[in-house]
Image: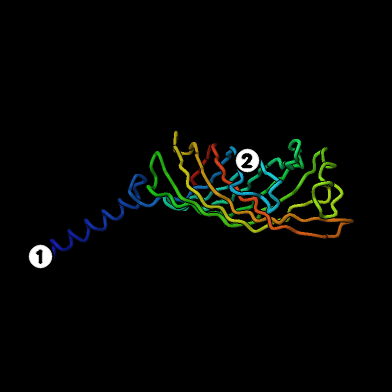
Amino acid sequence: MMDRFKHTVLLLIGGALLLFADPDSSAQPQGRLGFGLRAGPATYTQDITELSFIDGNLGPTLDFEILYEINEYVTLGFDLGWESHNVDLRLPAKDVSLGRITTISLLPCVEFHILGGQTVSPYMFFGLGYSINAFGTSDDSGAISPYLDLGVRSSKDLGVEDAFSFKIGIGADFFVADTFALNLDLGWKYNPGDLSVRLNKYQTASFSTDESVLTALFGFRLLFPL
């Protein structure tokens, strides 16, 4: 009986040593570090301001991300996003370009991959951070003065405030190699930057605005084992 017990213990120890020494064993994989680059269209999902005669149009967006894949189900990331939209002033005769709203978003985020390490890996994501908004005037700024009863002499007196923002959405990685994946991403970003009016560098009025957008991104990701 004692000999059989000794043989059983030796077999268990030997099996454990083989499990940890074999690189092809079922042990959890190490984390991976990577980056991604995506681009696509972005559109406002609502009126950008309570002033109904100001419209924001469809614009381009570009996204760069740094990724840390903890395991096959959870990935941490940091998104640096850029987008730009033309803003029109609707006049009785025709629409006039008021300028462009440009946004740079800094969003730490987390992804939850539903199926784990598959060739096609769908995921849900959530990001929380800060959006830096800027307003650039157009050459047609003189058309604004007869229609905004705010004492605004030109669109140079208008600006969009920065704001805390968050982004939610879904996406999928399509792995064509162990470390390279095509990526498709659909998300909604909340960005409530207010429209401000300034005369002689002093703010004279402010309007509640909403630069929240729906984005569709397509690009690639590279992931490298640590």
Q: Position of residue 179 (x, y in %)?
A: 48, 39
What label sits on residue 209 in the rendered view?
A: none
Q: Earlier in the sequence, mark 2 or mark 1?
A: 1
Label 1 Cα neighbours within 10 Å, binned few <14 / some 14-19 / many ≥20? few
Residue projecting furthest to the front: 92
Q: Is residue 145 left or right of residue 42?
A: right
Q: Position of residue 104 (x, y in %)?
A: 68, 48
Q: Residue 62, located in which quarter of the rendered image?
A: top right
Q: Judge by depth and name the residue closer to the eye, 78 or 99.
A: 99
Q: Position of residue 151 (x, y in %)?
A: 85, 54
Label 2 Cα neighbours within 10 Å, binned few <14 / some 14-19 / many ≥20? many
Q: Is residue 201 above or below residue 55?
A: below
What label sits on residue 1 in the rendered view?
A: 1
What label sits on residue 62 in the rendered view?
A: 2
Name the secondary structure under disc 2.
Answer: strand
Q: The residue under label 2 is which amino acid type? A: Leu
Q: Is residue 140 left or right of residue 18?
A: right
Residue in view at x 26 percent, y 54 percent:
14
Residue projecting furthest to the left: 1
Q: Is residue 156 left or right of residue 129?
A: right
- Name the image colouring: rainbow
Q: Judge by depth and name the residue closer to the eye, 6 or 84.
A: 84
Label 2 and label 1: CA atoms lie apart by 71 Å
Name the secondary structure under disc 1.
Answer: loop
Residue projecting furthest to the top: 176
Q: The residue under label 1 is which amino acid type? A: Met
